[in-house]
Amino acid sequence: MAGVSHRGPGASAVPGPRRLRPTRQRLAVLGALADADGFRGAQAIHASMRAAGERVGLATVYRALQALADAGELDVLRDDTGELLYRRCAGGGHHHHLVCRGCGTTVEIESSAVERWAASVGEPHGFSAVEHSVEVFGTCRSCAKASRPPGA
Amino acid sequence: MAGVSHRGPGASAVPGPRRLRPTRQRLAVLGALADADGFRGAQAIHASMRAAGERVGLATVYRALQALADAGELDVLRDDTGELLYRRCAGGGHHHHLVCRGCGTTVEIESSAVERWAASVGEPHGFSAVEHSVEVFGTCRSCAKASRPPGA
DNA sequence: ATATCTGCAAAGACTTTGCAACCTT
DNA sequence: AAGGTTGCAAAGTCTTTGCAGATAT
């Protein structure tokens, strides 16, 4: 069971984050995410990969996204329908998103004021281990123009 | 404002919010929600109703919750697993929640600062029709004590 | 050589929907 | 009586999992 093979100098007993193998499929998933500058669902990502000629199974895409998200390489959020959306994460820090409903284009946003508020709002009510979820949705300029015929 | 008094004759052609019939099942759903002071999932609500001796179908509970939420009688949110949770809504206004992960107990919270921030954060990026989603999760005093053996 | 990873299909969880019978208005 | 409601079960989505074969180190 404890088959710690020879994989690294001074390796401690801690499990440690497993390194992911750079397989063709995993790289393709990252590539698909790189092409899009917004959040996309697993099924959409899979579809675009197939459309691009990649031979990948849907389950593999799900597993890759899960692994990448666990590794902190991707940001995850849920849309109104409950579907999970993924996006290449720019910074490793804590941040939120301004997401376009139309195309998924995303802008990372931050606000120390909101962070402070969220962190302190639990105290007066006796809540501990407080975490928060903040997402902002809107329509970006391009999509607004597209849906609103010129002259409107 | 979710209740149109009398659907008098000569009413406009607009569909208008249908009034819900106070059926045994619908009332029971409201009753189940009244008992709990926190967010609960449809399945959990159904289970507690059955446990209480109510004869209700799961689909009916789902439909009732949907209708009540549409009518503005309930607040809805999604937990980490994507499940929809419902709660009797105190005020009709816009507000957010501080929810206990353990028991679901909820405190409605507000912050004009956060509202302003959310409303204005889209502008500099060209986003319009901005909406936001904010939820705060934590552990309430009771649950914190329960999970932490005395003396710890 | 071996632990991973992939693909397909089956399974799982939550939610919605079709339809006949039932109940409220 | 008329039409909204209910209940059961089937269907639908998104996501996860089992397992044999392929793959990376």
Image (cartoon, coloured by chain):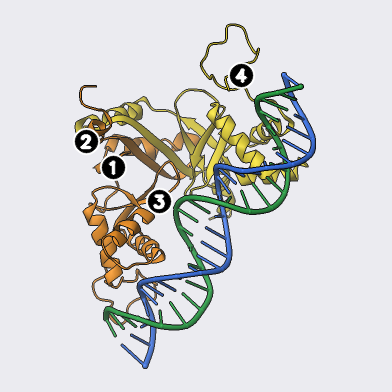
Chain colours: A yellow, B orange, C green, D blue
The residue at which mark 3 appears reads as B84
Chain ID of residue with mark 1: B
Res B133 visible: yes
Q: Compute the Cα span from label 4 to label 1.
A: 41 Å
Q: Nearer the viewer, residue C5 or A34?
A: C5
The residue at which mark 1 appears reads as B103
Q: Compute the Cα span from label 2 to label 1.
A: 9 Å
Q: Compute the Cα span from label 3 to label 1.
A: 15 Å
Q: Compute the Cα span from label 3 to label 2.
A: 24 Å
In this rendering, which labeled residue sits more in front, label 3 or label 1? 1
Same chain? Circles 3 and 4 = no
In percent of the image, x 28 and y 77: which residue is there?
Answer: B7
Q: Compute the Cα span from label 2 to label 4.
A: 43 Å
The residue at which mark 4 appears reads as A3
Chain ID of residue with mark 2: B
In the rendered structure, find residue B142 and report the number of the disc placed on it. 2
